[in-house]
Image: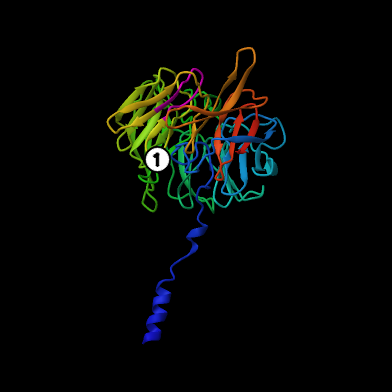
């Protein structure tokens, strides 16, 4: 009897152990804007002193941030005249190339997504695909449009939102569709996946979904900017993801609360209750994620062309762009309270937050324009350090903070810079 009880207890404690193989986002800067919520914030303790370790060119152009994995890999989605365009480099080995391949061009506005096993997920016009730690394809599936930056919505589940408004969830391992798709725009033509791509970078009407979706694991809410055919301005649209339910994806609401319409990707708070987004009316807006109603808005007095950044405790650093000012806002639940602002610092990128802030700013003057990576305090916005970016041309595409504190930034001209804690 005792032996039987012991055996039963041992067997009863042996549940399934295969959940560890389910893909999850890498612990680094897994994709553009860091995580599925687009927070541009990481728990990594960022260094306030850095040293430029390497610089390398993709020999083409870039329009999205570098992704970094749980190990020592980074991935970039270049647009090149010939040769490789999707590249994986060793971040701790002076950007030595691990592997590369060529994708159908036109999808540069989306970054790669890396999972914790260093599998890579990315789209090209008409396709979504996954690569293992080598350049050989794990799986490839057709979609309608260009998949924007991909997100993990649950262990082993991959969210795909295309620029033409098709929304699907894939099994990340097998590449099969989970549940049914949702079309945010009627009349999608599967033979015309490149339609409107030229409007995406500037968020113009012919690109229905021009920016990466935001997803909250806490609430299951997915929020995307949506410019419906014939509409005067874009709106925000929300869906809900409920794994295992029928259907798994449902439309929740559409909101025109944002003045002039939203610009750039939305961002979700840590608890998923609030959507933060830039308005084309030069204001930062906070919306209730339950129904899309406005909670508050704050005038920025400049057009923020990149998304805001949000820490877990609700500090918001406003988005960047030409004419911007480095500004921090606290969400008090009743209003957005400006905590500090720097009239003398104009971030050109979304700020990346890791205990300190990182952003690329203009460096030099009109006769000798340049760019520099600046490190600033989240407490008062004061500049901690500034590092010029040699031969930086074009516009900066953002700053990525790796799991070990390394910092990578890049420009539209294809220059990539790797910094190590100094």
Quarter of the image containing the C terminus?
top right
Task: Confirm whether the magenta stretch covers residue 252.
Answer: no
Picture coordinates of residue 40, whole percent (x, y): 47, 36
Displayed quadrant of residue 67? top right
Picture coordinates of residue 299, whole percent (x, y): 36, 20
Q: Residue at x 40, y 85 (%)?
A: 3
Which residue is situated farthest in the right direction here?
83
Picture coordinates of residue 398, whole percent (x, y): 55, 31
Magenta stretch, main secondary structure, is loop
Residue 110 visible? The answer is no
Q: Is residue 89 above or below residue 284?
A: below
Q: Nearer the viewer, residue 231 or 353?
A: 353
Q: Is residue 286 above or below residue 342?
A: below
Quarter of the image containing the N terminus?
bottom left
| Mark 1 residue crowding within 10 angstroms, few (<14) / some (14–19) / many (20+) | few
Residue 266 visible? The answer is yes
Task: Confirm whether the magenta stretch covers residue 326.
Answer: yes
Which residue is situated farthest in the top direction here?
367
Q: Secondary structure at mark 1?
A: loop
Displayed quadrant of residue 109? top right
The residues colored magenta run 317-328
Q: Nearer the viewer, residue 92 or 295?
A: 92
Q: Residue at x 51, y 19 (%)?
A: 322
Q: Is residue 46 left or right of residue 239?
A: right
From the image, tell me which residue sits under label 1: 312
Which residue is situated farthest in the bottom direction here?
1
Total numbered labels placed on residues in the image: 1
């Amino acid at each position: 009897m005792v032996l039987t009880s012991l055996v039963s207890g041992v067997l009863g404690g042996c549940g399934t152990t295969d959940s560890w193989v389910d893909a999850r986002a890498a612990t680094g800067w897994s994709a553009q804007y860091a995580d599925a919520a687009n927070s541009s914030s990481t728990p990594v303790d960022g260094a306030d002193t850095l040293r430029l370790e390497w610089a390398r060119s993709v020999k083409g152009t870039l329009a999205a941030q570098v992704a970094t994995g749980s190990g020592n890999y980074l991935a970039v989605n270049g647009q090149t005249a010939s040769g490789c365009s999707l590249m994986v480099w060793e971040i701790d080995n002076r950007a030595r190339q691990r592997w590369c391949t060529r994708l159908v061009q036109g999808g540069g506005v989306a970054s790669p997504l890396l999972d914790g096993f260093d599998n890579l997920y990315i789209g090209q016009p008409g396709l979504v695909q996954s690569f293992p730690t080598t350049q050989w394809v794990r799986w490839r599936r057709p979609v309608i449009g260009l998949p924007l930056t991909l997100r993990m919505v649950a262990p082993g589940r991959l969210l795909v939102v295309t620029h033409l408004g098709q929304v699907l969830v894939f099994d990340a391992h097998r590449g099969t569709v989970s549940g049914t798709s949702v079309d945010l725009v009627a009349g999608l033509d599967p033979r015309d996946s490149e339609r409107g791509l030229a409007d995406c970078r500037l968020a113009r009407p012919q690109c229905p979904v021009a920016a990466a979706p935001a997803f909250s694991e806490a609430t299951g809410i997915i929020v995307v900017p949506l410019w419906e055919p014939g509409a005067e301005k874009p709106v925000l649209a929300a869906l809900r993801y409920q794994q295992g339910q029928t259907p798994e994806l449902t439309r929740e609401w559409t909101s025109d609360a944002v003045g002039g319409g939203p610009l750039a990707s939305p961002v979700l708070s840590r608890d998923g209750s609030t959507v933060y987004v830039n308005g084309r009316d030069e204001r930062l807006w906070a919306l209730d994620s339950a129904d899309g109603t406005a909670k508050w808005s704050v005038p920025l007095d400049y057009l923020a062309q990149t998304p805001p950044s949000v820490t877990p405790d609700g500090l918001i650093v406003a988005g960047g762009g030409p004419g911007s000012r480095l500004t921090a806002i606290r969400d008090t639940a009743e209003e957005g309270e400006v905590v500090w602002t720097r009239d003398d610092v104009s971030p050109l990128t979304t700020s990346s937050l890791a205990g300190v802030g990182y952003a690329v700013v203009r460096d030099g003057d009109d006769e000798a324009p340049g760019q520099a990576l600046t490190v600033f305090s989240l407490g008062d916005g004061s500049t901690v350090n500034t590092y010029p970016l040699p031969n930086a041309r074009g516009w900066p595409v953002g700053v990525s903070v790796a799991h070990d504190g390394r910092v990578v930034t890049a420009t539209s001209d294809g220059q990539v810079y790797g910094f190590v804690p100094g």
